[in-house]
Image: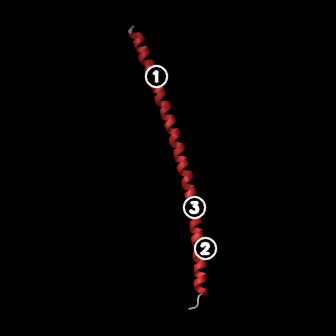
Amino acid sequence: MSMKDAALRFASTMDSELIQIKADQMEQGQQLTERINSVDSRLKDLRSEVAAVKDTQAQMLDILIDIQRRLPS
């Protein structure tokens, strides 16, 4: 094998490895984006649930206050 052939083979191998590394990075980036979006979606759901619990708690407090006012002193 001549030096020229060895150099071309080396360059070709390096090029293939760099392409694979870039593809792996893009795939990992996509997976990370999907995970972030999933966490964001879950966080929105949890915020909605917390808001609903707060509303229910406020309603229950209003009911308890009303009952307390109606009780004889």
Residue 42, position as x, y percentages in the image: 55, 53
Q: CA distance from mark 1 to mark 3?
A: 51 Å
Label 2 amino acid?
Gln
Label 3 amino acid?
Glu
Mark 1 surroundings within 10 Å by alpha-carbon count, few (fewer than 14), some (14 through 19), many (20 or more): few
Label 1 amino acid?
Asp
Secondary element under disc 3, as helix, strand or loop, is helix
Q: Earlier in the sequence, mark 2 or mark 1?
A: 1
The structure residue drawn at horizontal position 40% and vertical position 12%, both measured from the top left corner, is 6
For the residues bearing labels 2 and 3, Cβ distance under 8 angstroms: no
User: Mark 1 — residue?
Assistant: 15
Q: Who is closer to the viewer here, 37 or 8?
A: 37
User: Mark 2 — residue?
Assistant: 59
Mark 2 surroundings within 10 Å by alpha-carbon count, few (fewer than 14), some (14 through 19), many (20 or more): few
Q: Residue furthest bottom?
A: 73
The structure residue drawn at horizontal position 42% and vertical position 10%, both measured from the top left corner, is 5
Q: Earlier in the sequence, mark 1 or mark 3?
A: 1
Q: How many marks overall?
A: 3
Q: CA distance from mark 2 to mark 1?
A: 66 Å
